Amino acid sequence: MNTRARLPLYAATLTALCFALVSWQLSQTLPWQEWWHSAQQPNPDDYRQLLLWYSLLPRLCASLLAGAGLALSGIVLQQVLRNPIASPSTLGIAGGAQLAMAAGGLFLPAQLAPPTEWLAMLGGLAALSLVLTLAWGKQLSPLAVILAGLVVGLYCGALNGALILLHEQRLSGLFLWGAGSLNQQDWQAVQFLWPRLLIGASLLALLARPLSLLSLQDAQAQSLGVPLLWLRLAALLCAVWLCACVISSLGVFAFIGLAGPAMARLLGARKLWQQLLWAPACGALLLTLTDQLLQWGEPRGLGWLPTGAATALIGAPLLLWLLPKVRALRETDENASISQRQHPGRWPRYIGVLLLLSVVAALLIGRGQSEWLALDLPTLQQLLPWRLPRVLGALAAGILLALAGCVLQRLAHNPLASPEVLGISAGSALGLIALVLLVPNPARGWQLLAAACGAALSLALLLHLSRRAQYSPQRLLLAGIALAALLDAILHLLLASGDPRLMPLLYWLAGSTYYTSIGQSLALLALAGLLALLCWAGSRWLNLLSLGAETAQGLGLNLAKARLGLLTLAATLTAGATLLIGPLSFIGLMAPHMARLLGAQQVRAQLLLSALIGALLMVLADWLGRNLLYPFQLPAGLLATLVGGLYFLFGLRRSGQ
């Protein structure tokens, strides 16, 4: 029996398993002989009947409705955009909806705030519009759309993190809600969902026939009288509406909108009407099965795991598996946005002076009980032990990330590559967290080794995933973002466990330098200097690799040795920075690109200027984070992410023009 013939058997097995788990879960609460009587008229004095009627059954219905709604939204998005990996998660719709609800709850007066589903829909539409605008220059190529969507989703997540840090009390429940929880105490969520999903599904049923014509070329569809613009707009509105209703009532369930349609196609649904029927059924099955497995594992220590976060462990590997099946994206012109100047001129000196002034300002100027602190010597002596470690730590982290980004961009021949975007920073953070869980109070040297191993493993996995595409720069970039989504899901699952050993890492994950000491900062600065020398020594390899593999080999370069050495160097640079600043800051993206814009096209010139720019950006981010919203503090990594995310989107937009 071949693989395709086995697929219906696998689906039937999953359905039977789901049915068995549901039956077991209900029978554990109430014998099956009493189910019908309890459903008709639950006894208020019997807690088992109340638990069945007001918790278990609403939870089951909510999982079925949410899975069906998200999968239906995903299949419509894929049909409209002609993109087999489009979904609410990969297009940034889920992140935009979540951000809009958080911001609306904070800043809109209660009497003016619209219903939650409309807030979520506005946020989702705004995110989708931004994604389509960014990818328009590449004719909405599948990989361009997904690349823009994943980055918009990451940026919305960073903005959500900033809101949570600034309004911790008011948004304390946003983290768990954003992870997607199906816990129910009544039928309110089900009563909210079913009529709204029914309206969306009915509208899509009316559009099913013209939607099927979108598989044709635009000219062919227009010759048949199809109003393409209005049809696509109506279908996208319906898809975002379905997603917004689920998110506003239950939270974010990552990648169900991708997994449901993919499973339907694997089972043989080729025509659109088949997919519109099968995809919701598959989505409902996948989400319900995931939730039932978590409930089954609750007595075994899995009760802390949010259902939505668990679905990311299914969807992110699925996205990585689907990547080779989509059309290749037109290669980015590496020199499209690079200055025509061949030498940076005096820019290194100017940036160096600005860096020195920024360090002095960060040490001398800040806000305290008075508006701006005096610069007298006694006050400075009191504050220097607090400020100096943070300034030196930010300086070292900026140098390390900038050098890592420069090496990766040269190695991948892609100006949009960086340790944060490719998931290497997330791998480094995961390695460090694993060490903290396994070893009590590990030494700093062991922490660096664990972080470096995590970065190296994630980088090795990334290269393995890109091998079939011959390390295509665009495929490497997209695979890295998908890998980052998977590692980020694992990080959130570990943090959601409530392990007290991980609680101090929450602020570190946002990129704060608050807990660094003078010894740690000096050690990291020394490491940055040592690795900078190694980068300088490896610049010959980078120069030869930029000529192409065949030319480099003809000039006597051992490709395997050179690539392994440079990748190990990039992993170590990333690990060192991650120890202090957390897994995301986008400095590794911005600094090398800005150096190229200033004319540093030679490898050594770019390394030098990138290091200076990275250090300047991180010192400024740390200083501004301490003073902008005093007495509240924005972590330097988070502030750099908010700026760097905009820079990434700008770079993506320019690469498509």
Image: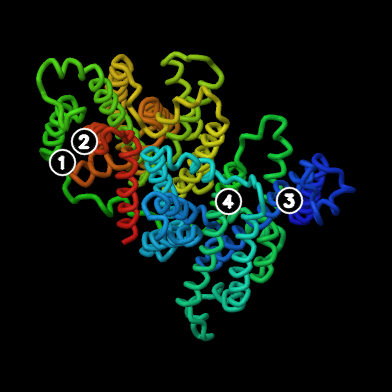
Question: Alpha carbon of mark 4 to alpha carbon of mark 2: how far?
Answer: 48 Å
Disc 4: which residue:
250
Give the crowd class for mark 4: few <14, some 14-19, many >=20 residues within 10 Å.
many
Of the residues under marks 2 and 3, which one precedes in the sequence?
3
**Quadrant of the image for the C terminus?**
bottom left
Viewer-nearest residue: 369 or 127: 369
State yes or no: discs 1 and 3 in contact (Cβ < 8 Å): no
- Tell me where residue 420 sits by quadrant: top left
Among numbered discs 1 and 2, the one appearing first in the sequence:
1
Q: Answer yes or no: do the residues labelled 3 and 4 have beta carbons within 8 Å?
A: no
Asked if labels 3 and 2 touch by Cβ distance under 8 angstroms, the answer is: no
Residue, disc 2: 609
Image coordinates for residue 485, horizontal then vertical, percent: 50, 43
Callout 3: helix, strand or loop? helix
Whether pointer 1 and pointer 4 mark residues with C-beta atoms closer than 8 Å, the reply is no
| Residue 164 falls left or right of residue 65 | left
**The disc labelled 3 sits on which kind of residue?**
Leu
Residue drawn at (17%, 15%) of the image: 381
SS class, disc 1: loop
Circle 1: residue type: Pro
Residue holding disc 3: 57
